[in-house]
Amino acid sequence: MAVEEGKKAPAFTLNDESGNKVALKDHLGKDVIVYFYPRDDTPGCTKEAQGFRDLWKQIQEHDTVVIGVSPDGQASHEKFKEKYSLPFTLLSDPDKKVMEKYGAFGEKMMYGKKTTGVIRSTVWIGPDGKVKKHWARVAKAADHPAKVLEALEKDE
């Protein structure tokens, strides 16, 4: 498995919705929630993004950064962020290299068929750059942000 709890999280630098480069190391000293999702403005991905948006204030109370990553480009991210008033950064991983490093791209089951694609997953990286928790396959996108907040609250 690419990501292991207790081990250093793989480094990355990707472009955000405004075309700025964002590196994981920019957030050292803070907890970082990196969530990987298949596509902007699709039902499950929208519910998940809205969940993180709706819990934003509580997540902020834990000095935590949220970053969404999908293969979508800058223009798509910009529209998605604006349409749903998302307060966090969205990064583009068009060649899926970061997703592969994090185990968020590969074989999965979709509607009973094996397919290759983005695996909805989340990685919580601690202030020291090590993986605190890895949700390898998120089943219910809408419920997931609350589970992340719950884990942050238990960590206090």
Image: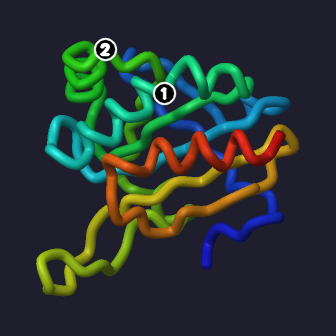
Q: Which residue is mark 2?
A: 85
In the rendered image, the vertical position of residue 91 relative to residue 126, given as above or below: above
The answer to whether any part of residue 125 appears in the image is yes
Q: Position of residue 32 (x, y in %)?
A: 66, 38
Circle nearer the N terminus (2, 1): 1
Q: Nearer the viewer, residue 130 or 19?
A: 130
The answer to whether any part of residue 94 appears in the image is no
* Callout 2 crowding tier (Cα within 10 Å): few <14, some 14–19, many ≥20: few
Q: Quadrant of residue 134?
A: bottom right
Q: Amino acid at mark 1?
A: Leu
Q: Which residue is mark 1?
A: 55
Q: Position of residue 11 (x, y in %)?
A: 68, 48
Q: Nearer the viewer, residue 140 or 111?
A: 140
Left or right: 127, with 74 as reference point: right
In the rendered image, the vertical position of residue 65 relative to residue 40, given as above or below: above
In the rendered image, the vertical position of residue 15 relative to residue 119, given as above or below: above
Distance Cα–Cα, label 2 vs label 1 = 13 Å
Q: Quadrant of residue 139?
A: bottom left
In the rendered image, the vertical position of residue 109 relative to residue 51, given as above or below: below
Q: Position of residue 43 (x, y in %)?
A: 15, 44
**Residue at the image point whose x is 27% and y is 34% from the top:** 73
- Element under disc 1: loop
- Element under disc 2: loop
